[in-house]
Amino acid sequence: MDHIGESETPTRLRTTPSWLLTQTAAHAGRLVSEGFGGIGARGYHYRILAALDEFGPASQADLGRRGGIDRSDVVATVNELVAKDLVVRAPDPADRRRNVITITPAGQRELHRMGETLAAVQDALLAPLTATERGQLTRLLGKLLTHHRQRH
Amino acid sequence: MDHIGESETPTRLRTTPSWLLTQTAAHAGRLVSEGFGGIGARGYHYRILAALDEFGPASQADLGRRGGIDRSDVVATVNELVAKDLVVRAPDPADRRRNVITITPAGQRELHRMGETLAAVQDALLAPLTATERGQLTRLLGKLLTHHRQRH
DNA sequence: CCGCTATCGTTGGCCGCGCCAACATTGGCT
DNA sequence: AGCCAATGTTGGCGCGGCCAACGATAGCGG
């Protein structure tokens, strides 16, 4: 009758690319969360610190655009980063609507730490793939991403 | 100095596989949500209906295992499916801890409809990829998934 | 110069998905 | 009989993505 069995995944799911994507992304997200959670941080922090480090001081709106974060979420994230002294928020004298966000030395150190844990996560995530396969994967995902970013 | 520019993505993000994964998964999820949302459904519904259709009546715990859904979330989802008459919940006479969930004809029709919208989403999602590239992608993702599913 | 429109920061809220703890009920095993 | 495992259910948490509204400010066209 019913084998008290191995709980197989339905074919309809196993063969659906979007399912494979969201599932692997969920695994990746869990690994990243664990890594970042260990140091009291999360993805939004890394995105904003990375943008600040690469492009220099910026307004919150710019940070949101570069990191793909909603303006409202940028507010909360910058609040957290300010509380940790990883970032400084100052009004922009040239445009009084804006705040200028600047990364602090402590913020750069934190970014470096997060980068290391992220690198470890990548290794764990891509463990079953060869070097060439990893290249294929990043290429294909990049292709999808650039395509759908244009499409608004 | 500062070009009021095109809000480029930081290199640290662009080159991180887990970032590519979660971003493309976010796009995929948005497409799926839009498709399903148009018919008042969501991902959990499809997962459970698909499992029921392929393996026949099952307990809620089994459904959760097959669809990768937490027991508590299965409860809520089955409630919704019952309210829509897509599924029937009955106590299992052979094991009074369990409920037996059975898909109804209306549920099968709904599953079919959802399958069609899902197929359309896959096309939109994978539009920029050739057939062989799509095969590569699903193969690589499948490899990652089976690997990390074993690792608990 | 005035007024319209756009942008910015901020608040507050919503949804989907993944997960966990607790509890009472029931089954299975020894 | 007694212990342990499984089940369904309730309630809660966190992250990520998104939207609506508002006041303040800038910029632009008439």
Image (tube, coloured by chain):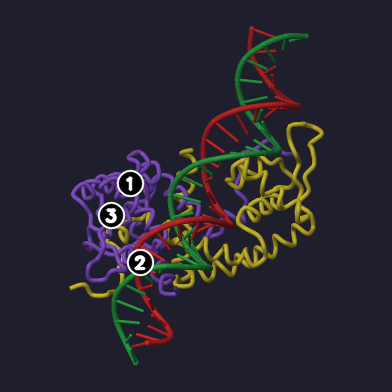
Chain colours: A yellow, B purple, C green, D red
In this rendering, the count of numbered labels is 3
Task: Look at the image and tell me in which quarter the N terminus of chain A lies.
Answer: bottom left
Tell me the SS state at disc 1.
helix
Which chain does the residue under circle 3 lie in?
A: B
Q: Which of the 4 image quadrants contains residue A35?
A: bottom right
The reply to whether discs 1 and 2 touch (Cβ–Cβ < 8 Å) is no
**Share a chain, discs 3 and 2?**
yes
Q: In the rendering, which numbered label is found on residue B65? A: 2
Q: Which of the 4 image quadrants contains residue B59?
A: bottom left
**Share a chain, discs 1 and 2?**
yes
Q: CA distance from mark 1 to mark 3?
A: 22 Å
Instruction: Please state which amino acid type lies under the numbered disc 3.
Output: Leu
Instruction: Please state which amino acid type lies under the numbered disc 1.
Output: Asp
Is residue A84 shown above or below A97? Answer: below
Tell me the SS state at disc 2.
helix
Q: Position of residue B28 (x, y in %)?
A: 42, 49
Q: Residues within 10 Å of mark 3 (few under 14, many from 20)?
A: many
Tell me the SS state at disc 3.
helix
Q: Which of the 4 image quadrants contains residue A109?
A: bottom right
Q: Which residue is mark 1?
A: B123
The reply to whether discs 1 and 3 touch (Cβ–Cβ < 8 Å) is no
Specify which label sits upstream in the sequence, 1 or 3: 3
Which chain does the residue under circle 2 lie in?
A: B
Residue at 32% x, 61% y is A14
Seen from this angle, which residue lies furthest right? A93
Residue at 75% x, 39% y is A99
Q: Which residue is mark 3?
A: B49
Q: Position of residue A87 (x, y in %)?
A: 76, 51
Q: CA distance from mark 3 to mark 2?
A: 13 Å
